[in-house]
Image: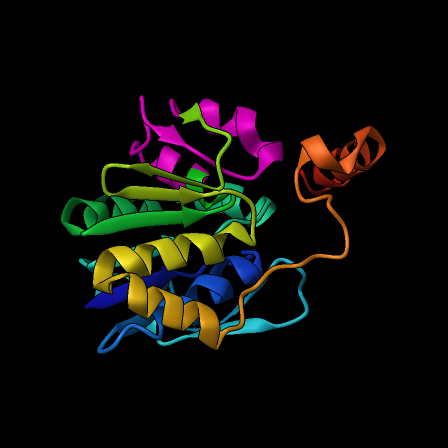
Amino acid sequence: MQIAFLIYEGLTALDIIGPYEVLSQIPGADIRFVAKRSGPIVVDSGAFSIGTEHKLADVPRPDVFVIPGGIAGTFAAAKDPEILDWVREAHAHSRYSTSVCTGSLILGAAGLLKDANATTHWAAKTLLEQTGATYTEERIVVAGKIITAAGVSAGIDMALYLTAELVGPDLAKLAQLSIEYDPAPPFDAGSPAKAGDAIVQRALEEFAKEL
């Protein structure tokens, strides 16, 4: 089973690393990090790079692919014809096509979310709907073979769900245990409904700066 992770300049690191840590535990999985060019690709913080060995053309038809999100880098990727062509071709032959956070904007830009339920980071709801999708306020949204995850950390949940679909719930539970994914955050502020108006407004201001 070939699983491709799309890598592009300015992606959010956890969007890709979280799902990778889960999906890489599938027995026999052939994991490929793919990008327009091989070599190091800088993440959105600029603090480090993710190495890629495979160009898009090297992995045209993966069984599963994962598209991470970001902000400025994601908007650029969503306008890149080479990336969008790869997404369309990969989706035409994939078993599952998935995204994390604003990675769904790339699926949408490729024309794959028209009239479909999907999710993304809560602050990008309007942008997702502009692609023709119906924003659904869920952590994971399944629309046929397309699976979209909400913001950043939801990619881990998506990957666990996907693992169960691919190889069964026991191996998904084993993966969850191996990464000790047992969330007990010190604050109950993980959604706009819980964080409070002041924190939500501050988050939106930070998002606007990135835009």
Quarter holding the C terminus is: top right
In the displayed structure image, the side of residue 144 where residue 43 appears, left or right? right
Residue range in magenta is 105-133
Task: Give the x, y percent position of residue 199.
Answer: 81, 37
Quarter holding the N terminus is: bottom left
Residue closer to the observer: 34 or 199: 199
Residue closer to the observer: 56 or 195: 195
Task: Give the x, y percent position of residue 196.
Answer: 79, 32
Q: Is residue 210 above or below residue 122?
A: below
Does the magenta portion include 36? no
The answer to whether residue 59 is seen in the rendering is no
Q: Residue at the location (38% across, 34% down)?
A: 108
In the displayed structure image, the side of residue 25 where residue 192 appears, left or right? right
Q: Residue furthest right?
A: 198
Residue closer to the observer: 155 or 45: 155
Q: Is residue 103 above or below residue 64?
A: above
> How is this picture coloured?
rainbow
Q: Is residue 6 above or below residue 113?
A: below
Q: Residue at the location (38% across, 72% down)?
A: 174
Residue closer to the observer: 33 or 41: 33
Count the marks: how many? 0
Residue 24 picture quarter? bottom left
Residue 45 picture quarter? bottom right
Does the magenta portion include 122? yes
Q: Residue at the location (29% across, 72% down)?
A: 26
Q: Residue at the location (31% across, 21% down)?
A: 115
Residue 84 picture quarter? top left
Q: Is residue 93 above or below residue 197?
A: below
The answer to whether residue 137 is seen in the rendering is yes
Task: Give the x, y percent position of residue 132.
Answer: 38, 22
